[in-house]
Amino acid sequence: VQLQASGGGLVQAGGSLRLSCAASGRTFSAYDVGWFRQVAGKERQFVGAIRRSGVGTGGTTYYADSVKGRFAISRDNAKNTVYLQMNSLKPEDTAVYHCAAGQRLITSSYGRAESYPYWGQGTLVTVSS
């Protein structure tokens, strides 16, 4: 699967942005999708993830504590797209945001970058104070 992240930009603190992760292929609904962010010189940081679609726990979302209550992940399988809605943005949210995809992740692995073999190119989010 190939991923394309978009929607980044410059926003003032307190503002909102919505990032999109568009995927190629017809079975994107079967993939677990994660969002990570990275600041130059620092390790890639888990932001959140959404479980593959399906009965029961399909579509479950997971978030890092630093974004819980401010960010929300959703997916539109008809459009092969996963969204990251970011509200109440803070200057410390400034980073390059990447989406990533994997299959059959277990709950404990959603927050680990190495769980995802497929990555998009990243989109820059800058939050000014």
Image (cartoon, rainbow, N blue to C red):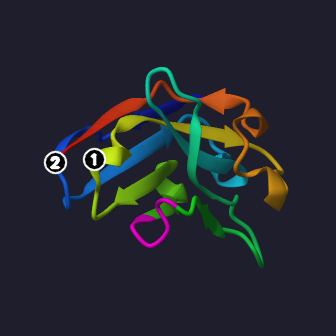
Image x and y of residue 69, in percent: 44, 73
Q: Is residue 106 above or below residue 59?
A: above
**In the drawing, what numbered circle is on residue 91?**
1
Quadrant of the snapshot with the N terminus? top right
- Is 74 left, or right, of 7 in this rendering? right
Where does label 2 land, which residue? 129
Q: Can see residue 105?
A: yes
Residue 84 in the image, given as x and y percentages of width and height:
43, 55
119 is within the stretch colored magenta:
no
At x 50%, y 57%, the residue is 78
Magenta span covers which residues?
Answer: 66-71
Left or right, 107 with reference to 93: right
Q: Amino acid at mark 1?
A: Pro
Establish if 82 lies above or below 94.
Answer: below
Q: Quadrant of residue 62?
A: bottom right
The secondary structure that most of the magenta stretch takes on is: loop
Residue at image location 63% in from the left, 43% down from the top: 26
Assess whether mark 1 and mark 2 are in contact (beta carbons under 8 angstroms). Answer: yes
Q: Name the residue located 43 percent from the left edge and 54 percent from the top edge.
A: 83
Residue 78 image label: none
Element under disc 1 = helix
